[in-house]
Image (tube, rainbow, N blue to C red):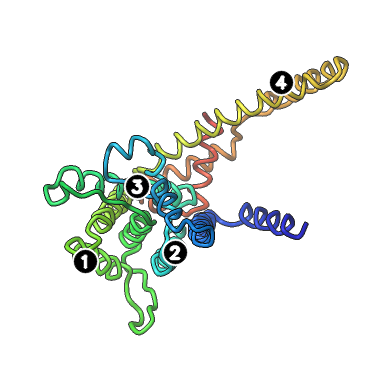
């Protein structure tokens, strides 16, 4: 019972947390699961168990392996196995993710995290399958570094003069932190983790593209969020249809008739109210005027959320 209550509390805490913390908790959860798998394998006399599990989480460079496990394009960016690896990535993600949310929305944070990871995966696969130096090698990619560095790069370009206090260094602008990070990534390409560093470059490219386009009023994460919304809406419709059919089949006929009347009354009540009020339209006009003057990046997070909400009402 105590274990059940603990899991229930953890689930409630996860649902109540911010998008940034949800991403961090997912990374921590996968890390703990991989570590527990390794411990179980050792005590069960199967020390190779963790290697088998990791092969279904990491992104393989070989197309023949990737075809059989396409989900690794996403799972790799939420998985870490080394303690220092996850510690560095999540600290960097928390610091820069918090700053990123000062000029962006939580939906853009999640989208940039995933798109940055996909950019890193694309460059990693391209390098291993096109460059002669990797011709006879099979590489494996794991870690959220490409996703995190996309957020770091985007934040530094959007807020170049924002200063952070670093231990032993003092106050320093974000642009210099980003430049130092990119230089270290480029230097690491010639090291033992060349594939991982190449993926980092993909993350840098995605982060820079996002920030530059955002300064011009274009959001490259919008198509991703629109696609995600459509998938979520389709799933909700499917779930509602299945659950509605199941529920109606279990109700007596008299209750079904009463339910249908209630549904018609609810539908009429909803249609009687306008989907977009005059206040919404005035707020939208004010936000659009501000975009014309200072671009999309000039909007506050509240204004961006308002723009998204009113746009959905109009649609």
- Of residues 309 and 19, the one drawn nearer to the viewer in this rendering: 19
Residue indicated by mark 1: 183
Per the image, the residue denoted by label 2 is 90
- Sequence-first tag of 3 and 4: 3
Mark 3 / mark 1, whichever is N-terminal: 3
Quarter of the figure that contains the N terminus: bottom right
Q: Give me the residue at 75% from left, 25% from top.
A: 266
Above or below, 289 against 235 in this view is below
Q: Tell me what residue is drawn at x 71 percent, y 24 percent.
A: 244
**Left or right relative to 279: residue 200:** left
Residue at (59, 40) in percent of width and height: 279
Residue 59 tag number: 3
- Mark 2 vs mark 3, CA separation in Å: 20 Å
Q: For the view shown, which residue lies furthest in the bottom direction?
A: 168
Kindly check if marks 3 and 1 are in contact, taking CB atoms under 8 A apart as contact: no
Along the viewing direction, whichever of 257 and 144 lies nearer the viewer: 144
Q: Which mark is residue 238?
A: none
Alpha carbon of mark 2 to alpha carbon of mark 4: how far? 44 Å
Q: Secondary structure at mark 3?
A: strand
Instruction: Name the mark on residue 245.
Output: 4
- Foreground mark, 3 or 1, reads 3
């Amino acid at each position: 019972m105590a274990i059940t209550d603990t899991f229930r509390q953890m689930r409630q805490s996860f649902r109540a947390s911010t998008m940034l913390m949800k991403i961090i908790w997912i990374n921590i959860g996968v890390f703990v699961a991989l570590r527990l798998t390794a411990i179980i394998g050792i005590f069960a006399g199967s020390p190779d168990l963790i290697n088998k599990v990791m092969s279904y989480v990491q992104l393989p460079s070989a197309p023949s392996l990737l075809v059989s496990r396409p989900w690794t394009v996403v799972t790799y960016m939420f998985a870490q196995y080394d303690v220092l690896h996850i510690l560095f990535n999540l600290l960097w993600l928390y610091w820069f993710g918090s700053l990123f949310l000062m000029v962006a929305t939580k939906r853009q944070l999640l989208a940039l995290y995933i798109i940055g990871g996909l950019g890193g995966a694309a460059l990693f696969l391209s390098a291993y399958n096109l460059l002669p130096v990797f011709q006879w090698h099979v590489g494996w990619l794991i870690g959220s570094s490409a996703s995190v560095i996309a957020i770091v790069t985007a934040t530094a370009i959007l807020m170049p003069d924002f200063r952070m206090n670093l231990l032993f260094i003092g106050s320093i602008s974000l642009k210099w932190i980003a430049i130092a990070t990119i230089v270290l990534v480029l230097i690491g390409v010639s090291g033992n983790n060349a594939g991982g560093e190449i993926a980092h470059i993909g993350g840098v490219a995605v982060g820079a593209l996002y920030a530059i386009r955002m300064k011009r009023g274009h959001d490259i994460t919008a198509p991703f969020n629109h696609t995600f919304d459509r998938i979520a809406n389709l799933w909700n419709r499917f779930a509602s249809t299945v659950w509605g059919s199941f529920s109606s089949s279990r109700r007596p006929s008299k209750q079904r008739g009463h339910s249908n009347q209630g549904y018609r009354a609810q539908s009429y009540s909803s249609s009687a109210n306008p989907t977009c009020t005059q206040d919404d339209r005035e707020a939208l006009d004010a936000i659009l005027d501000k975009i014309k003057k200072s671009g999309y990046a000039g909007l506050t997070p509240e204004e961006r959320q308002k723009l998204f909400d009113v746009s959905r009402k109009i649609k």
